[in-house]
Amino acid sequence: MKITFLGTGTSQGVPVIGCYCPVCSSLDFRDKRLRSSILVEIQDQTFVIDTGPDFRQQMLREKVRKLDAVLFTHEHKDHTAGLDDIRSFNFLQKKDMPIYGTSKVLNQIKREFAYIFEAVKYPGVPAVEIHEITKDPFQIGDIPIIPIQVLHYKLPVLGFRFDDFTYITDAKYIEEEEFEKIKGSKVLVLNALQQTHHLSHLTLVEALEWVEKIKPEKAYFTHISHKLGCHQEIEKDLPENVFLAYDGLTVNL
């Protein structure tokens, strides 16, 4: 399995144009963060989790030529706004794109991208194949996937486990039953928005507490805001098996 971080940033705490904060003025490429998304290549399948506003740029940067399905964690725009750009894969692959999400997520997509679902479609609009999921395990082809439900303040959000890899973003709270689904993961990706308290996102300290309980071989933090700080400064103080992810980072399992 190969994991590529398409984006590790967030719309939370984005500074104004012309900002000269340490992150904005950093020359370290690891501090240049597009909205959070991840590419999962497993067996002969290629999946994207979330299509944020930067989806097209991320696909071009990583030269992705094949996409078998899109999985959505939740319905917020920074995780869905780029869906229109799957049309390139419709053209290349000559088939509808399977998309997976809860009923709430799919209903939101149907409202925001109503033109995709019209009875009489305008030529060239994206074509999708809807798959409704819950927090119960499901499969895409021969690939088993375990959804993990967390709460983003009061909003249910799904993380996803593929074999020994678990990806969770926009989490603040998790029920013990869902927490059990993560245990045994060798690689864990978890959101860590900033260092100070936030209503709906894990802080750096809270994310480290989750890692301590789960005890993966390696953990990577994503969904990072400018308020967390610069990559080099934050990562040097992390445990030896914990890393800040950055856009374009690849991890092989």
Image (cartoon, rainbow, N blue to C red):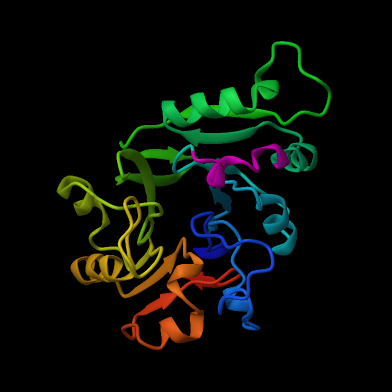
- In front of the other: 60 or 19: 19
* Horizontal arrangement in the rendering, residue 73 relative to residue 122 (left or right): left
How many numbered circles does the render carry? Answer: 0
Q: Quadrant of residue 244?
A: bottom left
Quadrant of the rendering where the C terminus is positioned? bottom left
Tell me where residue 242 appears, x and y as whole percent: 36, 78
Residue 123 in magenta stretch: no
* Horizontal arrangement in the rendering, residue 141 relative to residue 165 (left or right): right
Residue 84 in magenta stretch: yes
Is 84 drawn above or below residue 193 in the view shown?
above
Q: Quadrant of residue 7?
A: bottom right
- In front of the other: 14 or 79: 14
- In front of the other: 37 or 162: 37
Which stretch appears magenta? 76-85
Name the residue rendered at 32%, 64% in the picture. 203
Name the residue rendered at 31%, 51% in the picture. 199
Q: Quadrant of residue 115?
A: top right
Is 141 drawn above or below residue 9 in the view shown?
above
Is residue 101 visible to the viewer in this orientation of the structure? Answer: yes
Outermost residue toward the left in this view:
176
Is residue 137 visible to the viewer in this orientation of the structure? Answer: no
Tell me where residue 223 appears, x and y as whole percent: 46, 60
Tell me where residue 215 appears, x and y as whole percent: 23, 71
Outermost residue toward the bottom in this view:
236
Name the residue rendered at 41%, 68% in the picture. 221
Outermost residue toward the right in this view:
123
Tell me where residue 128 appears, x and y as whole percent: 64, 29
- The majority secondary structure of the magenta stretch comes to helix
* Horizontal arrangement in the rendering, residue 175 relative to residue 240 (left or right): left
